[in-house]
Image (spheres, rainbow, N blue to C red):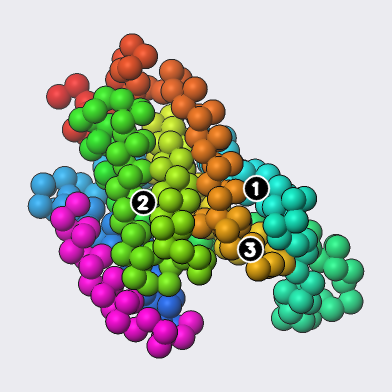
Amino acid sequence: MSITLLLSSIVWLLTIHTLGKTGSFGNRVYGYGIMWCPALAAYITCKILGRNISDLAWQWGKPKYMLFSYLTPFLYVLIGYTIVWICGAGGFYNAAFLAKMQEDLGWTNVPPGVFLVIFLILQGVIGLIPSIATALGEEIGWRGFLLPEIAGSTRSYTKTASISGLIWAVWHYPLLIFGNYNSGGPSWYSLVTFTIGVISISFIATWFRLKSNSLWTGVMLHASHNLFVQGVFDPVTVNYPGTKYFTGEFGIVIPSIILLFAIYFWTRRKELPLCPDTNTTPSSIHPSVSSN
């Protein structure tokens, strides 16, 4: 963790120093940089410990777990934003945004309702590629390296998901508190809602990681979450004065729905190969957690 902290601190300082000065290019560079710090830290740590980076669960695993990892965020985000729209905390749909997307694609003659479906499909397929590219950097570190280390020490799904989720959440705090990584609401509110959401997602990601023995489930889950929240449902929603308190990763609705999903996955912990608190036999999920 000290290596991750050191590497991340460099990007945190650069980002905070240029707060309000950087354009989209600067935001992309620092955004990609911070998300790949965990991967670089994992690589350096493996070198120091004499481990192979190829041991970090790169196998694809069963396709159904990849599909479920992709669809799970779509489902909880859809439920969350539908609640927001029905309750009037945000509007459906942002006609100006969709019109701009139609103009960019040259499809101005397509009916808005039809284009909304096309936009969802395009983002869900093509937009997933760059989202995977950024999520992979974090997941190599969090689910590829850190999670098996914690699981090997605690031998508990609940503890592994909680500890790794808390570390994952706190890692975001510097930019959330001192940067502009929030919805514009009070920092304390963003900290609470974001922490609930991230730790809850950790329970889902941990379940898929242990069940599939593949870090790619974490990548797919992470990429899908970022894509559908930031790239689809947020921009499609009309913002009212109080919308920021309900939508996105820093509102109350999405983290609350994710928490319910996390509870569901927690109830299925007995299905996992590493769950000593339910008296199941641990299996090899990492060279350090094998029969050696």
Quadrant of the drawing holding the C terminus:
top left
Residue denoted by label 2:
169
The numbered mark at residue 80 is 1
Depth check, front residue: 53 or 4: 4
Residue type, mark 2 in image: Ala
Residue denoted by label 3:
242
Label 3 close to label 2 by CB (< 8 Å): no
Range of the magenta residues?
Answer: 1-24
- 25 versus 140 height, above or below: below
Number of other residues with Cα within 10 Å of mark 3, as a class: few under 14, some 14 to 19, many 20 or more: few
**Identity of the residue drawn at 27% across and 44% down:** 146
Q: Which element is circle 1 on?
A: helix
**Identity of the residue drawn at 36% across and 65% down:** 177
Q: In this view, does 53 lie to the left or right of 218?
A: left
Residue type, mark 3 in image: Gly
Residue type, mark 1 in image: Gly
Depth check, front residue: 76 or 47: 76
